[in-house]
Image (cartoon, rainbow, N blue to C red):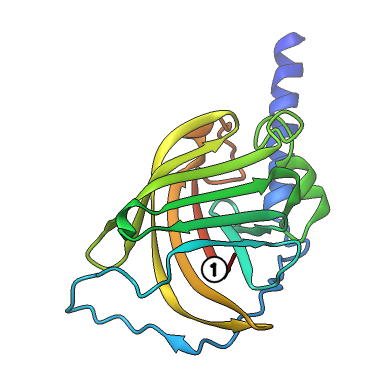
Amino acid sequence: MVKKILIIGSVLVVIGAIVLFAIPWGEYESNLEKTELENEVVYDQDEEITAPSIEQGSYSVSSTTSEGAEILFLTSGLKDTKGGFEDFTISFNVTEDFKTSSLSVEIQTKSINTGNAMRDEHLLEEDFFHASKYRIIRYEANAIDFGDTSYIAKGSLTLNGTTKELDVPFLHKGGGDKDQVPFEAFEGTVVFDRTQYGQEESSGAGNEVTLNFYCELEKQ
């Protein structure tokens, strides 16, 4: 009898995963509004990456006050799950030696949005982001390296209470002025295994997460 109950429970879990991840109930819609760049940077793949022409100082953006930044994610499973975070801050301290610049990203876990309220609630539970315990997702980098095709932030990601080193490639897209405030635009993509940060494997969601970001950081 107990064995039968366990089997039924397992079947229900699988069915639940299919409902949450396979049925296309809503799609995340980006609210990003990019500002026209006055000094757009064009990269030549045949040339080495060098330090960008950025004024020293502190740059930052908050998603709650600016539509010029977004952090998106994608996981593959029974159906690709796309979404974003709607409450985050990004700070970048640019030093004279660009390689010693520092980057900080703080994301409010509960701000996750996949365009499906039921799926969002499930992702915030213990098996995934466990938002009631881990309110913030944080990335910190204290060094910038020059890769073959991009800059690379050398830092660590803290997710679900687990901190692991994670290199984040990114590009400087250029700069301009937004309401008479100078800004510098950056974008990048990073891939990591969510199960390495304490999240459970699921038949409905893939382990590999791809993060894409774009941000217009304003000079402080």
Quick one: SS at disc 1? strand
Residue 42 vertical position relative to residue 53 in the rendered view, above or below: below
Compared with residue 36, is residue 89 higher up or lower down, i.e. above or below? above
Number of numbered discs visible in the structure rendering: 1
Q: Residue at x 55, y 75 (%)?
A: 183
Identify the residue at image location x=52%, y=86%: 37
Q: Residues within 10 Å of mark 1 (few under 14, many from 20)?
A: many
Residue 74 visible somewhere in the drawing: no
Residue pictured at 79% horizontal, 43% vertical: 121
Viewer-proximal residue among 207 and 162: 162
Q: Is 184 or 214 nearer to us in this picture?
A: 184
The answer to whether residue 205 of the structure is visible from this angle is yes
The quarter of the picture where residue 146 lies is bottom left
Amino acid found under the numbered disc labelled 1:
Tyr
Could you say where residue 74 lies in the image, as x and y percent from the top left? Answer: 56, 57
The one of 158 and 202 positioned closer to us in this rendering: 158
Q: Position of residue 73 (x, y in %)?
A: 57, 57
169 left or right, relative to 176: left
Q: Is residue 144 left or right of residue 102?
A: left
Q: Work out whether 30 lies above or below 25.
A: below
Residue 75 percent coordinates (x, y): 55, 53
Residue 151 location (% of width, % of height): 33, 62
> Which residue is label 1 attached to?
214
Q: Quadrant of the C terminus?
A: bottom right
Which of the image's four quarters has the N terminus? top right
Residue closest to the far top: 2
- Locate residue 49 relative to residue 26 in the image: left or right: left
Residue 112 placement, left or right of 196: right
What's the residue at 71%, 69% (across, down)? 66
